[in-house]
Image (cartoon, rainbow, N blue to C red):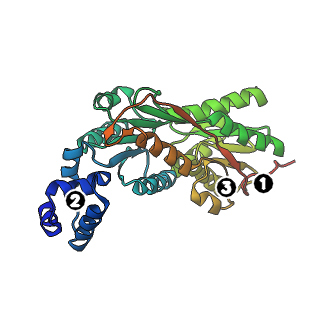
């Protein structure tokens, strides 16, 4: 079935059918309704590629994430896609696996598919790679990266506030020996979380033990290994903040394997508040990042770059995400 068959059945031109599909506001309501009824009867599915050639738009946004196995990102993808569908947009998802080389391939794929805009929800990017998007007028939005510019919006997480919430909670319980497991420090977001922890410790615990800072990889196994190294210290921390929830889950597992208890021996706090964090044993206290809000801001930043049917880049803005503390069972007062 093709557009010509629809036009013959509806007794209109193919141009009218095309306008009904792409610019229905330009067609008389009764004509549009009749054409749409024929489209439904014939089960006609418009050729997206042909539509892109005709309008200059693919009705597709790209969404680049770091790790599809980390529950934080599927939850973000789901929220982004839900909003996109409501606005008649499709979503092309690409996964970098924290690899800068794969990141370059993901960006090339977006250009090849002629997406209308790209939400880059990962920080492992060389900003030199984004030049072709600006030259083509393709809007971008970054999470934890980039600089606001023409056609470029950014979303920043207030990590200082988030880590501060975790530290104040632990100190209110009586903790003074606090450790930290970072993400891979080649990532901007991981470095920012570590910097936020170091700033907090400089205020609350100037004599911080370096042994209580370990680098993980944002995955469960990395959290286990980092916690294993931390547990070799002669003096153990009474609490540990992890740079994300998967790291915290790995840390808890390692603490249990060593015959220690959470939170009686060591309290643990995560970061992100993924869905499964409420069902760990014990349930994980964590810093919550609102995925639905991040997705909505990212989508809106791209969608607002449209002027009618044409892309019109605008000077970008930075939106700040404020984390919140979710207290569960993995934190408690230290042993006396």
Please tell me in which quadrant of the rendered image residue 213 appears.
top right
**Residue at (53% x, 45% y) in the render:** 294
How far apart marks 2 and 1 lie (CA) works out to: 61 Å
- Residue 22's x, y, as percent? 27, 52
| Left-right relation of 26 to 329 | left
- Side of 123 relative to 321 (left or right): left
Front-most of 64 and 102? Answer: 64
Q: Position of residue 91 (x, y in %)?
A: 36, 52
Q: Which residue is mark 3?
A: 284
Q: Label 1, on which residue?
A: 264
Residue at point 31% right, 36% down? 104
Q: Are marks 2 and 3 in contact (CB under 8 Å)?
A: no
Residue 152 in view: yes
> SS of the residue at dot 1?
loop
Mark 2, mark 1: which one is toward the viewer? 2
Q: How many marks?
A: 3
Which class describes the residues within 10 Å of circle 1: few (<14), some (14-19), or many (20+)?
some
Whole-number angstrom distance, CA of label 2 to CA of label 3? 47 Å
Residue placed under numbered mark 2 in the picture? 46
For the point 68% across and 59% down, the residue is: 283
Label whose residue precedes the other's in the sequence (2 or 3): 2
Q: Is residue 114 left or right of residue 189?
A: left
């Amino acid at each position: 079935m093709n557009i010509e068959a629809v036009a013959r059945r509806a007794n209109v031109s193919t141009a009218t059918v095309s306008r009904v599909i792409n610019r229905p506001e330009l067609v008389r309501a009764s004509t549009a309704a009749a054409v749409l009824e024929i489209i439904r009867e014939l089960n006609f599915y418009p050729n997206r590629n042909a539509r892109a050639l005709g309008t200059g738009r693919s009705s597709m946004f790209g969404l680049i994430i770091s790790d599809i196995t980390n529950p934080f990102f599927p939850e973000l993808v789901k929220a982004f896609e839900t909003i996109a569908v409501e606005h008649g947009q499709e979503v092309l998802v690409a996964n970098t696996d924290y690899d800068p080389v794969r990141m370059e391939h993901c960006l090339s794929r977006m250009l090849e598919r002629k997406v209308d805009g790209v939400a880059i929800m990962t920080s492992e990017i060389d900003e030199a790679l984004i030049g072709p998007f600006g030259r083509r007028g393709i809007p971008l939005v970054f999470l934890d990266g980039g600089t606001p510019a023409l056609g470029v919006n950014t979303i920043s997480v207030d990590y200082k506030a988030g880590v501060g919430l975790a530290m104040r909670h632990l100190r209110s319980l009586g903790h003074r020996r606090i450790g930290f497991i970072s993400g891979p420090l080649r990532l901007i977001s991981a470095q920012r979380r570590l910097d936020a922890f170091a700033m907090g410790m400089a205020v609350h615990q100037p004599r911080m033990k370096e042994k209580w800072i370990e680098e993980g990889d944002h995955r469960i196994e990395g959290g286990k290994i980092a916690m294993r190294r931390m547990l070799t210290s002669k003096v153990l921390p009474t609490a540990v903040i992890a740079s994300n929830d998967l790291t915290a889950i790995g840390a808890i597992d390692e603490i249990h394997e060593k015959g220690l208890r959470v939170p009686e021996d060591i309290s643990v706090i995560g970061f992100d508040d993924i869905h499964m964090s409420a069902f760990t044993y014990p349930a994980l206290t964590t810093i919550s990042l609102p995925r639905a809000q991040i997705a909505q801001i990212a989508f809106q930043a791209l969608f607002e770059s449209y002027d009618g049917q044409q892309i019109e880049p605008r000077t970008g803005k930075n939106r700040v995400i404020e984390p919140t503390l979710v207290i569960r069972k993995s934190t408690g007062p230290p042993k006396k």
